[in-house]
Structure formats: structure tokens, C-alpha cells
Amino acid sequence: MKIVTFQGGLGNQLFQYVFYLWLDMRCDKDNIYGYYPKKGLRAHNGLEIEKVFEVKLPNSSLSTDLVVKSIKLINKIFKNRQYISTDGRLDVNGVLFEGFWQDKCFWEDVDIVLNFRWPLKLDVTNSFIMAKIQTNNSISIHIRRGDYLLPKYRNIYGDICNEEYYQKAIEYILKCVDDPFFFVFSDDIDWAKSIINVPNVTFVNNNKGKDSYIDMFLMSLCHHNIIANSTFSWWAAQLNKHSDKIMIAPIRWFKSLFKDPNIFTESWIRI
């Protein structure tokens, strides 16, 4: 039995799903199960991936939970907080795979089709924003502050996507894109308004809590993307279907000594 843990926010759940598909290609799919710890999901918006995307997650049962407890007791746990090589370990049974699996090596070998569940329940405001995105040369800007300002996260993620980063990213877009229209998605809209000074701009902060995934959907519709050091907006850019899209990300992902995840291809612009 091989068990894949799904936890964290929507962006992390998507990486875990890709890892599950990667594992499924190499192992007996009837022997792969999912583990969905309430504590690991409660801090965000629960198990969002199945609600938001047309995906089929691995089964779970009471026996899965019992096996997980047994594995943890004997410490036969295969953790990955960033990147991990699984060479030589796929033939081991009774393994709990727990981590973020943020490495392009997993999705490069998998034929991934991720479609948003449709129709999404868009209210009048979001329908208006979507129409505006689709009828303009749209650029999404994601500004994440909120939890990144808390002491336990600030030392890891904080202050990387600062005013200088966003100004340089906007300057790059202005040189490459005609008549750009910016859509700023943020959990700190006042700070966003204080640093984003462009003629054509819409600030979006109406999707909160269980509706926050709609921001990912709207950002994915934009022609180009300026992301934060966040898997949430990284996936929005990745799901952007424009063939000529410009994707801009910070040159550093972590402020601390963590190694940056191997999730960027040559098509990304790093600033």
C-alpha cells in the first residue's frame, strides 16, 4: 500500500495531485490511496481540489487511517517539503508520501489535464470581471500579504514580492504589451493600491474564504501573469491557455535558507 497525503491550500493540493498521477503511472493504481488529514486541510479551505477541478482523487477508508497511524508509529514516512528523489523506493510497500512535491520532474512525465469544474458559480461582480478580462489585453498581478506577514511565515516568504519587484514586472509588461489592462488580486487591497499606479487597472478583492479559488480561475483567464511567491498564482499562470503568454515570477521563492523549488521552465521571466 502506498498512501499520498493531500493537505495545505489549493496550490499545494494541485502539486500533490500531480505527484499522485506520477506515482500512478509507475505503480499499481489499486494499491495507491489518499490520506486527507483534517488538521492539514482545516487551516485553509478544506479539500478544495475536487470541488474546483474535474479530478479523481485516490480512495481513502478507515483502514487507510489505521495504516497511516501505524506507519507514523514506526516512522516509515517519506516526507518531502520541497524536492525529493523517489528513485529506488517505489517498490516499497506501506509507505506514506507526505510533502509538497514542487518539482517539474513530476509533471514533465505526466499528461496532465486540469479543467475547472463548469459552470463555476460566478456572481454578477465576477461575471463582469471575467468579461472585462476576456475583452482586454489583460495582465493579472497577484499580491499576497495576509499570512505572509505573520512571524512564522515572514521569515520564509515575506518581503520578497515587494514594491520594487512589482514595479519592475510592470515595466517589463509595458515594454512588451500594447494597451495593457491590469487586474490586481490581493488580500491587502489598500497596500496594493498604494504601490500599483497604472492608468488601466481593476482591483479585485471580493472573493474570500471558500470563494477564493475564483481568483485563481480569473487570473488563469488573463493573457499574461505577474505572480507572487505563491503556488496559488503559480498555478493560475500555469493554467493560462494563451500560447503567447508572459509569466513573471520573483527571482527568489524563499527568504530563508530553503532551496527554491524546481518549478520554473525557460518560458518564465524571473525578476
Image: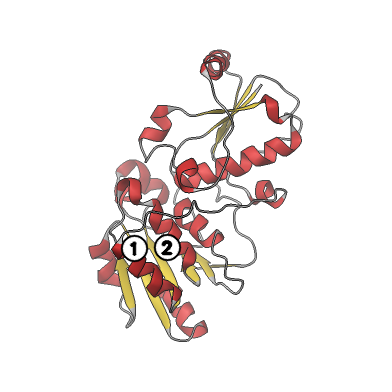
Q: Which residue is mark 2?
A: 218
List the single residue furthest toward the left.
Answer: 190
Tell me where residue 26 sits by quadrant: top right
Q: Are marks 1 and 2 in contact (CB under 8 Å)?
A: yes
Q: Position of residue 260 (x, y in %)?
A: 55, 51
Q: Is residue 136 above or below residue 235?
A: below
Mark 1 surroundings: few (<14), some (14-19) or many (≥20) residues within 10 A: some
Image quadrant containing the N terminus:
top right
Q: Earlier in the sequence, mark 1 or mark 2?
A: 1
Residue 198, by quadrant, is: bottom left
Question: How much space separates mark 1 and mark 2, taking CA atoms?
Answer: 8 Å
Residue under numbered circle 1: 126
Residue at position x 68%, y 25% in the image: 31
Residue at image location 25% in from the left, 70% down from the top:
194
Measured as percent of width and height from the top left, residue 230 is found at 45, 53
Look at 70% across and 48% down and name the residue there.
110
**Closer to viewer: mark 1 or mark 2:** 1
